[in-house]
Image (cartoon, grey):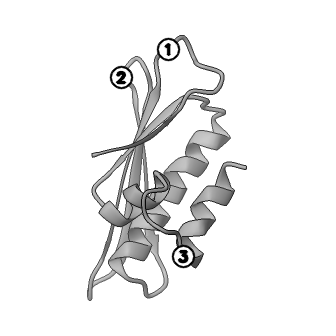
């Protein structure tokens, strides 16, 4: 599912892609993100969360991890994909943000 694109300082018109996912259940909580370069190279990131959280919280953490990785690499053009309707619609500004969702908008600034 498509989330968002930033077009500032276009890198030859070829965006990077970020795919993220998070999961929370009785066994544990984990997150993952993959940055895909314009030429198709994959850069995966995973982490186990050491705190109790909901599935939505895990999705936010996965998205944040991926966006931070993109910022650290000075990526300027990024398409973000995920399977969480909550995260997607809040990133696009189509659903009202609440406290934790609002943190996503502060990361890039």
Secondary element under disc 1, as helix, strand or loop, is loop
Q: Badge 2: how crowded within 10 Å, few (<14), some, or many (20+)?
A: few
Which mark is nearer the camera, 2 or 1? Answer: 1
Where residue 41 appears, as percent x and y from the top left, is: 39, 26
Q: In this image, 58 relative to 1: left or right?
A: right
Residue at 50%, 34% (x, y): give it: 78
Q: Are marks 2 and 3 in contact (CB under 8 Å)?
A: no
| Residue under pointer 3 | 98
Quarter holding residue 73 = top right
Mark 2 or 3, nearer chain start: 2
Q: Where is residue 63 in the image (x, y as percent from the top left)?
A: 46, 56
Q: Which of marks 3 and 1 is in front?
A: 3
Residue 40 shows which numbered tag?
Answer: 2
Alpha carbon separation for disc pair 2 and 3:
35 Å
- In this rendering, the answer to whether 92 lies above or below 75 is below
Query: Where is mark 1, residue-wise?
Result: 13
Q: Which residue is drawn at 54% across and 11% down?
A: 12
């Amino acid at each position: 599912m498509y989330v968002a694109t930033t077009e500032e300082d276009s890198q030859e018109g070829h965006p990077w892609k970020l795919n993220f996912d998070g999961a929370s259940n009785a066994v544990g909580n984990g997150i993952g993100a993959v940055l895909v370069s314009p030429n198709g190279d994959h850069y995966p990131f995973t982490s186990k969360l050491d705190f109790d959280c909901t599935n939505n919280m895990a999705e936010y953490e996965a998205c944040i991890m991926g966006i931070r990785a993109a910022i650290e690499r000075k990526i300027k053009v990024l398409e973000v994909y995920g399977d969480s309707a909550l995260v997607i619609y809040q990133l696009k500004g189509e659903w009202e943000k609440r406290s934790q969702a609002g943190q996503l908008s502060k990361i890039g600034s």
